[in-house]
Amino acid sequence: MKQAAMVAASTVVAERAHGAPATTARHSPHLRVVDGVQWDKAPCRFCGTGCHVQVGVKAGKVVAIAGDRQAEVNKGLLCVKGYHVGLALYGKDRLTQPMLRQGDKLVPVSWEKALDVIADRVTLDPKGFAFYGSGQWTIPEGYAANKFMKAGLSNNHIDPNARLCMASAVTGFLATYGVDEPAGCYDDLDACDVILFWGNNPAEMHPVLFSRLVDRRGRGEKVRIIDITTRHTRSSGFADDVLLMKPHGDLSIANGILHLLIKRGTYDKDFVAKHCAFRADTDPGTLPGKAITFEEFKQQLAEYTPEYVEKLSGIPARKIEELATLFGDPKLKITSLWCMGVNQHTRGTAMNTLIHGIHLFSGHFGTPGNAPTSLTGQPSACGTVREVGTLSHTLPGGRVVANEKHRKHAEDFWKVPPGRIAAKPGYHTVDLWRKFSTPKDKGGDIHTIWVQVTNPGQTLPNTNELFYPSRKLKDKFLIVSDVYPTETTKHADLVLPSAMWVEKNGMFGNSERRTQQWFKMVNPPGEARDDCWQIIAVARRLFDRGFAGMKDRDGKFLFNVEENGKEVPVWDFRRYYDTNVDRVLFEEYRPWTRMKHKDLAPYDEYVKTRGLRWPVVQQADKSWRETKFRFSEFDDPYVGKGKKIEFYHSPTEDGRAQVWFRPHAPPPESPDQDYPFWLCTGRVLEHWHSGSVTMRIPQLRRAMPSAYVELHPTDARALGVANGERIRVKSKRGDMELPVWIGGRGAPPPGTVFVPFFDESLLINRVTLDAHDPFSKQPDYKKCAVRLERLPLAVGTP
Amino acid sequence: MPVSSLVLTLSSSATLQQQVFERLAADPSLTLGLAQDVAANRLVPVVLETESVWEAQATAEKIAEMPGVDQVELVGVDFSDLPETGTESV
């Protein structure tokens, strides 16, 4: 082990002294064998940053992890989760065989039996079968699931957990630019003078990106960090300005900045004249809204004076003036980052469009360092959900099921008969689980949900209403594919053991449009199998039973894979790796990406690199070139010559982006006499989402073993509780008893408490609210009203 | 026992480099590899063995503060001899 560690360090030194090392080719051109340890590249399994790691494998086991110095994203650095990602595979309670519920128990069954059970549930009523997926699905997995449901079952009831984390970012991009995903990239972090965190704590959630910023300071560069937040976080500790706002105060802050830019005449008149149009909500609201004039825009913003904004947001008027001064300075390069604080918001779409609007209106757009960039929480929320279109209303490549032309494209790409793709969107996440928890005779028309790579029993909001009731309804059947036991598998009817990360081939798409690839390096334990295989195997079982949906126009199997003109039986797991199914599915998916100019390179190009940012376009010399800055002529090949900036998917089809007026509106629930505190929920550095993986990594679990409730000292005194004592956090929907942490990692202001959601023994989503944004359908996990109840001390407590 | 791989970047001063080597060699938790010159700096691969991750972090921070050490990079963590662990046993 020590020798392997020395090899890792010496390799880095040698690489820098003598250039990149020679590679040996097996399936991967990056594979190196050093002292019996095979090293190969893979993106990290956890967040949406998309760091690359070097994975060391010996005797069929991952034995070491190192940061990948050739990766542009992380340049060799990893966070504490990344350094321990290899241990994610080796928790001793890995699921290793399919299990079917019999009475109160889950009993082992064969894969054959499991596949039959799923096929039976589909044929029972194909329209009531649903799929709940994930931003942790690989691109080929998500593509296969989407095809299985939308082409195979003619059923759009497929939605991913990414609905809960970035759906508002999608609707924000669509409403502004007519096409999803950020125009900028991480290079902006290296070039900006000022960076704003809007409801974002990258020091814990995207630590490697945060390090890129802080490292600049270490090199003597000046970068001003402004943290707009509802609680003091680790990111706040590094900020030059911490603007502690009232929950839901962000819209007024954005409007205050826009108001002052107009009043002072410091907006970018040339940029606005050439590239922008103005828009406002309709009543009732629609995503496209309605066009307004500049004068109407100005008039609607008029009331958002710094003093009025101070009243709504709690941010001093002079700070609003300062923000407007920064955005009014054309010499400064300004980047905005945001994440869950803006997205998990009942006005999430509105707030997303406002951040874009400030950047567009002030001209802080389209040059390195000037960008509004949303971050994602999952490793392939962008690649698998947004690009592959695994949402209940979307199809791959930016298409939607409601559009007849797009359905026709899908039927042609998938070679299925006309009319196969259903026109009506399926249920979005909140509705899907509500229908599943509603008896059939009361409108609950979803009888089965197949869950892959996510843990809704812990992560759905308001689980007392959305998750648990279904478990008491006899005709509702829950199938869960996962790697470890979770709150969801505990309540499942059928549990399928899955392969994870480098136990299978995979591709992810990160937050900066970067598509990444890796190869399988070790075998999964026991009978655990790839999620993608599980989907194909069920499809084949249906095909063999004569289920028409699993046949294409020519009567061939929907997931037909051929090599040299001969069918490869990939539905048989023993034959699954006879070919590279990821490569086959990715090449099938690639042509979909061109309509929205999100062109992807051939699979083999991703094998060579640590990812490429789309659009990736082939050059005259046959090489493939990625795009760092979208819509900017100096870098984006799709911008017309001489246009400098062109929004070529403009919602108004005139090359213009939309600057929206979005009024402040109160949150769906606010503290009152009975429930006087705000509850905010979120994540911590050491754990990834529901903690089902990171809680099995000893170093991470020991570092952060339990959830807690962060409390302001004043509130703790008033309640008469000290650090470590347990209190009950209670909302109108449920309650949870938690230990108090005062003066801990984060510091909420008086009247606010914070609880992380990673702990399966302390399920805070029994308390949260399922109110959601009207356009994105993304719920608000960041604010609901609770009361705190002191619990009697246990006998013997000093 | 966590085993960490570090890369130290030493300053160009030969005197300071010598002092750093002497101090590092005296620390039993560290094993030094073959140093190489890159531009004006000297890079040293180092293996750090500690009882806990936190001890590793503290040692790395201590090294970073030594005069003559420009940078300490953590480039790998090896965990091949750690026992398998489930949630209930931690």
Image: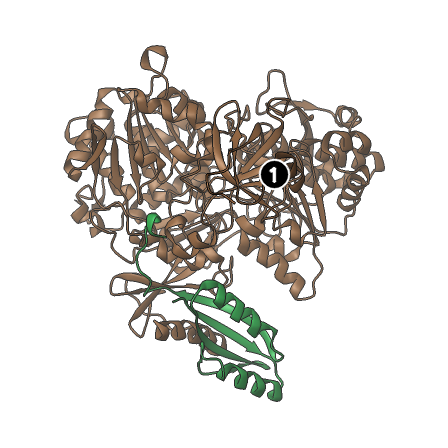
Chain colours: A brown, B green
Residue sitting at x 40%, y 40%: A760
Task: Rate crowding at label 1 as few (under 14), some (14 to 19) or many (20 or more) other CA atoms within 10 Å.
Answer: many
Drawn side of residue A663 relative to residue A171, left or right: right
- Chain letter of mark 1 equals A
Residue lying farthest to the right in this orientation: A264
Q: Quadrant of the N terminus of chain A?
A: bottom left
Residue sitting at x 35%, y 36%: A487
Drawn side of residue A283 relative to residue A730, left or right: right
Task: Find residue A415 and report its horizontal and vertical position in percent.
Answer: 29, 32
- Which amino acid, by three-letter code, is at mark 1? Phe
Drawn side of residue B38 relative to residue A586, left or right: right
Residue sitting at x 34%, y 39%: A486
- Which residue is label 1 attached to? A647
**A397 up-or-down from A667: above or below:** below
Task: Find residue A227 and report its horizontal and vertical position in percent.
Answer: 67, 46
Answer yes or no: is residue A437 visible. Answer: yes
- The residue nearer to you, when weighing A599 against A239, is A239
**A718 up-or-down from A520: above or below:** above
- The residue nearer to you, when weighing A636 against A19, is A19
**A96 up-or-down from A105: above or below:** below
Task: Find residue B9 and report its horizontal and vertical position in percent.
Answer: 55, 76
Task: Find residue A502 and report its horizontal and vertical position in percent.
Answer: 32, 54
